[in-house]
Image (spheres, helix red, strand yellow):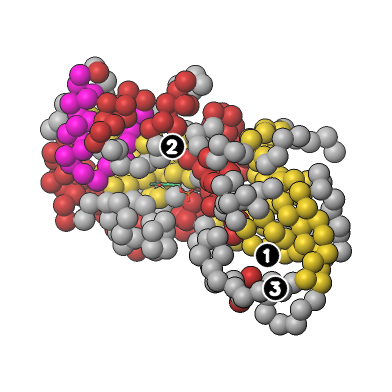
């Protein structure tokens, strides 16, 4: 089979989605399924929808367009603030976007009017993580301006934590978001449909008992559904599969070699000073070194989970060097690696990695 490839167990993705949708549904929180780590894969999107997510979310307009071309008609949210130069495409392909710049919303407004469409706006609030978001003191003014624009409708408010600075969603910052929602509603005399509390990093907060979710009724989940892990700790989430995605690479060399380089050394291809970093300190010994045809162009090597008995030595653009304990794989053998979010993202968006979808393998 073609290597390198990512094998996607769609059944596991679907079950993870269903489990989270059910758990959160019982406390009044709807799940929007985020496909961006898969580059907007229509197959993954359909699996999320079968698992009960109420909408899809993407970070890039070209991925939204890919989902539309595949015939997906569900509501799609653009979670990265639109590029002004793409306002028309955003309005044409996405139903809602998360926004923090009123001038950009003006462009969405005029594009929507020209296209005869109504575009949903969620205003993002900065509550500590310091990526996107209006400062809380500026929200009312922005909300009033959005409410007065044609072609757009204020669907809600939201926040994104953890991604930039690792700020943990907790009772305090979530209460702040609820308070912002209440304040906007009182000021405009409307009811906000979406109070979007965040991403997979919100799960520990959301599922803590007793539930104290305030006005928050929406989360945007990617990593937890795809990889079954809590991004704050990367610990597996109880009841979810962590192995829906596997990267497979092919062995191209397998030999007993010394563990220490010979000759004087400078920087390697990626600017690392070889030495401590690649674990060659200490006494020289011999071991089995295996080269896999898998490199930085295909995956983030630091995000690969080695198969049992293997240890990563290093990686360049096209070569992954691993030390093998006892096994002696021959050239042509395949090695299978678990992935973290970074390795998954690179593999699914790399033009040199094939994606294969499998359903439940026969027992
Ligand atoms: C990526 C992203 C998400 C999804 O994050 P996960 O940690 O994968 O659940 C949600 N919201 C925004 C704004 C994002 O950029």
Q: Secondary structure at mark 2?
A: strand
| Beta carbon of the mark 2 residue lies under 8 A of ligand 1 | yes
Do we see residue 31 in this rendering?
no
- Residue where numbered disc 2 is placed: 57
For the record, the magenta segment spans 94-114
Q: How many marks?
A: 3
Q: State whether residue 66 is above or below residue 15.
A: above
Residue 26 vs 282, above or below: the answer is above
Q: Quadrant of the C terminus?
A: top right
Residue 164 in the image: above or below residue 140: below
Q: Could you tell me residue 56's position as x and y percent?
A: 46, 34
Residue 85 on image: x %, y %: 25, 33
Q: Residues within 10 Å of mark 2 (few under 14, many from 20)?
A: many
Picture residue at 64% right of the left edge, 70% below the top: 278
Q: Earlier in the sequence, mark 3 or mark 2?
A: 2
Please name the predominant secondary structure of the magenta segment in the image. helix
Tell me, for residue 262, which label it has, or none: 3
Front in this rendered view, residue 272 or 212: 272
* Residue 17 sits above or below residue 64 on the image: below
Relative to the observer, which residue lies in front, 195 or 37?
37
Q: Quadrant of residue 73?
A: top left
Q: Which residue is mark 1?
A: 313
- The image shows residue 183 at horizontal and vertical percentages of 20, 49
Q: Give the Cα distance between marks 1 and 2.
A: 37 Å
| Alpha carbon distance from label 3 to label 2 | 51 Å
Quadrant hosting residue 174: bottom left
Residue 101 forms part of the magenta stretch: yes
Going 49% across and 51% down the picture, which residue do you hit? 200
The earlier-in-sequence mark between 1 and 2 is 2
Disc on the earlier residue, 1 or 3: 3
């Amino acid at each position: 089979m073609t290597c390198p490839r990512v094998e996607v167990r769609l059944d596991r993705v679907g079950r993870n989605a269903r489990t989270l949708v059910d758990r959160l549904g019982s406390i009044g929180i709807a799940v929007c399924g985020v496909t961006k780590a898969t580059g907007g894969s229509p197959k993954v999107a359909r699996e999320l929808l079968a698992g009960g997510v109420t909408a899809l979310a993407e970070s890039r307009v070209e991925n939204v367009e890919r989902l539309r071309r595949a015939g997906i008609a569900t509501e799609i949210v653009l979670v990265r603030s639109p590029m002004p130069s793409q306002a028309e495409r955003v309005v044409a392909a996405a139903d809602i976007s998360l926004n923090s710049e009123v001038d950009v919303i003006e462009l969405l407004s005029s594009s929507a009017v020209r296209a005869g469409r109504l575009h949903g706006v969620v205003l993002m609030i900065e509550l500590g993580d310091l990526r996107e978001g209006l400062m809380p003191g500026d929200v009312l003014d922005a909300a009033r301006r959005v409410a007065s624009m044609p072609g757009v409708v204020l669907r809600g408010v939201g926040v994104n934590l953890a991604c930039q600075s690792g700020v943990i969603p907790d009772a305090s910052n979530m209460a702040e978001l609820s308070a912002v929602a209440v304040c906007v509603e009182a000021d405009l005399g409307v009811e906000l449909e979406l109070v979007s509390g965040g991403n997979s990093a919100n799960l520990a907060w959301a599922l803590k008992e007793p539930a104290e979710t305030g006005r928050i009724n929406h989360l945007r989940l990617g990593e937890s559904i795809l990889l079954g892990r809590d991004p704050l700790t990367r610990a597996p989430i109880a009841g979810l599969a962590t192995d829906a995605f596997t990267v497979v690479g092919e062995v191209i060399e397998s030999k007993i070699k010394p563990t220490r380089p010979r000759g004087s050394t400078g920087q390697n291809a990626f600017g690392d000073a070889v030495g401590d970093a690649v674990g060659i300190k200490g006494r020289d010994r011999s071991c089995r070194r295996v080269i896999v045809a898998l490199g930085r162009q295909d995956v983030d090597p630091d995000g690969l989970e080695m198969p049992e008995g293997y240890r990563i030595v290093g990686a360049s653009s096209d070569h992954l060097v691993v030390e093998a304990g006892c096994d002696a794989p021959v050239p042509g053998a395949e090695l299978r690696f678990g992935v973290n979010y970074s390795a998954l993202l690179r593999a699914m968006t790399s033009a040199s990695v094939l994606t294969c979808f499998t359903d439940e393998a026969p027992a």
